[in-house]
Amino acid sequence: MTTADETRQRLLDAAGPLFAEQGLKATTVRVICDRADMNLAAINYHFRDKKQLYHEAVRHAAHCCDARVPIPDWPAGTPPERKLRDFVAMFLNRVAVDHEPAWHAQLLMRELTHPTPACAEFVRDFVRPCFEALSGVLRELLPDVPELKRRLVAFSIVGQCLHYRVARPVIEHLVGAGEFRNYGVDLLAGHITEFSLAAIDRLAARSHRKGPS
């Protein structure tokens, strides 16, 4: 006999790829239930409605991503430069590496670019802890730089990582499939970290010259 948890998971597994490809509005309850081989009442019983099912699909995808590639837990005394590289490698593993099932990452990227009411919880429980980890590293590297500037630096680092997800087809056309296959996490993490630390060092030196405001 199918348990309630198994039924919920079947609905999530059926709905997730559809939501990831088509979005919330374009995905119908009937198509979800046909794919899950269940009647229409199943969604109402287990999730109340399609919007809540979408919300749970985003939550499930984020939880799986977090469990698969957790935020680093650094031991005391880890140099901030090392922390930055670890963070970049972690984030690239989350956003630029293909994992199965593919709909997890696809749905989260859709939520980033086409936010729904689920976005607030997604940011609070998934994005913010990641951003706070990076912000902590930047506070060590740029202690005398204003918080606003540190946030802009954080967004620049995140943007470099996301580029290799969002612009992947364009990059592959530009450099060719052969070269693109060499763009692994180690190569990209090393480059992004080196590039970012050069900018961070310049900001730190400029802040030191200016002195406290």
Image (cartoon, grey):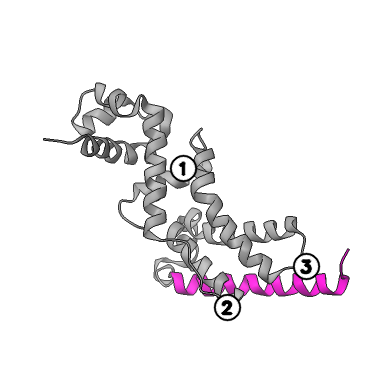
Q: In this picture, which residue range is highlighted in magenta?
A: 185-213
Q: Residues within 10 Å of mark 3 (few under 14, many from 20)?
A: some
Question: Residue 162 location, x and y as percent?
Answer: 52, 57
Q: Residues within 10 Å of mark 2 (few under 14, many from 20)?
A: few
**Left or right placement of residue 185 versus residue 204 in this view:** left
Q: Residue extending furthest front?
A: 76
**Left or right placement of residue 16 versus residue 41 in this view:** right
Magenta includes 133?
no
Residue at x-position 48% and y-position 74% = 187
For residue 183, say whether it is visible: no
Question: Residue 17 location, x and y as percent?
Answer: 32, 41
For residue 93, say whether it is visible: yes
| 199, above or below 164, in the image | below
Callout 2: SS? loop
Q: Nearer the viewer, mark 1 or mark 3?
A: 3
Callout 3: SS? loop
Q: Nearer the viewer, mark 2 or mark 3?
A: 2
* Kind of residue indicated by mark 3: Asp
Tell me the distance, in whole angstroms, between the alpha carbons under discs 2 and 1: 38 Å
**Left or right placement of residue 99 versus residue 119 in this view:** left
What main secondary structure does the magenta stretch of the protein show? Answer: helix
Question: Residue 125 location, x and y as percent?
Answer: 49, 47
Tell me the distance, in whole angstroms, between the alpha carbons under discs 2 and 3: 20 Å
Q: Which residue is mark 1?
A: 110
Q: Which residue is mark 3?
A: 144
* Kind of residue indicated by mark 2: Gly
Q: Residues within 10 Å of mark 1 (few under 14, many from 20)?
A: some
Q: Which mark is residue 77?
A: 2
Q: In the rendered structure, are the residues bearing label 2 and label 1 in contact, judged by CB atoms less than 8 Å apart?
A: no
* Residue 145, picture quadrant: bottom right
Can you say which quadrant of the picture contains the N terminus? top left
